[in-house]
Amino acid sequence: MKNLSHRYMIIALVSLIGIFTVQEKLFAQSLPSLSGEEILNKIDANASFGILRYRGIMEIQQQKKLLVKEFVAISEGDAKAFVEFINPEDRGTRYLKIDKDLWMYFPDEQETIKISGHLLKEGMMGSDVSYEDALESGNLLKKYTVTVAGTETLDGRPCYVLELTASTKTAPYDKQKFWVDGERFVVLKSQMLSKSDKLIKESQALQVRQFGRRWFVTELRMEDKLKKGGGTTFKMTDLEFDVPVPEDQFSLRRLSR
């Protein structure tokens, strides 16, 4: 009798798992039918803002060593950004991004360099986020063709699954795959792939917060699958929108001041 009861419990548990799986699929399938272009446009609209100021933390796991970097940042949309590191080891190191150009200021040498060429593939401050990743902005439709591969439920959220294929040589990755929250229109998970579908990098949203009508990913984890490390966690705090900034905020003069 004991074995029979145990068997019934297992059957019941398997049945429940099957029910939950079906419910999750139905939940994901209930999303309205949208094209890939429409979904990307909704992501852009949700993420659009004027001036944003925030504090950030990068926790970089390098095999057995954990590096913690702290910084303050000011950005104007996705076209301009000014970042200054404030942790003791990197204090005064700054970055300036204007469209597709990126400069770095070294306080000890009092030197400014433009990051270009092969340096763009390097990890920013030793993280899993490359300088090329940091520069990636603007309309993805200019560099990729996009298709909707289907819908899935990720962490309880109904998602559109998008597959992006590079249409220009300037695209940083041959392929990308996005899991897009179907209600909040933020990317909850992304994969960067080679032409042969080899996984290069993967990122996952760890926290999503609402600011007015906007939804923002305020914590995410990125892992470079080609490196021997434990990934990088990026956190944003103290977000302030539409704050006043000096006219020369995004200038080389302020970068080297």
Image (spheres, rainbow, N blue to C red):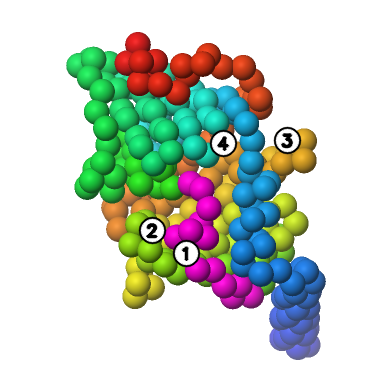
Closer to the chain start, of discs 2 and 4, is: 4
Mark 4 and mark 3: Cα distance apart in space = 15 Å
Amino acid type at image mark 2:
Ala
Task: Give above or below for 82 relative to 181.
Answer: above
* Residue 3 or residue 20, whichever sits in front: 20
Neighbour tally class for label 1: few under 14, some 14-19, many 20 plus, Cα within 10 Å: some
Q: Which residue is mark 2?
A: 171
Mark 2 and mark 4: Cα distance apart in space = 20 Å
Amino acid type at image mark 3:
Phe
Residue shown at the point (35%, 57%) measured from the top left:
170
Neighbour tally class for label 3: few under 14, some 14-19, many 20 plus, Cα within 10 Å: few
Left or right: 90 as drawn, with respect to 77: left
Q: Which residue is mark 1?
A: 144
Q: Secondary structure at mark 4?
A: loop
Q: Secondary structure at mark 3?
A: strand
Q: Secondary structure at mark 2?
A: loop
Amino acid type at image mark 1:
Tyr
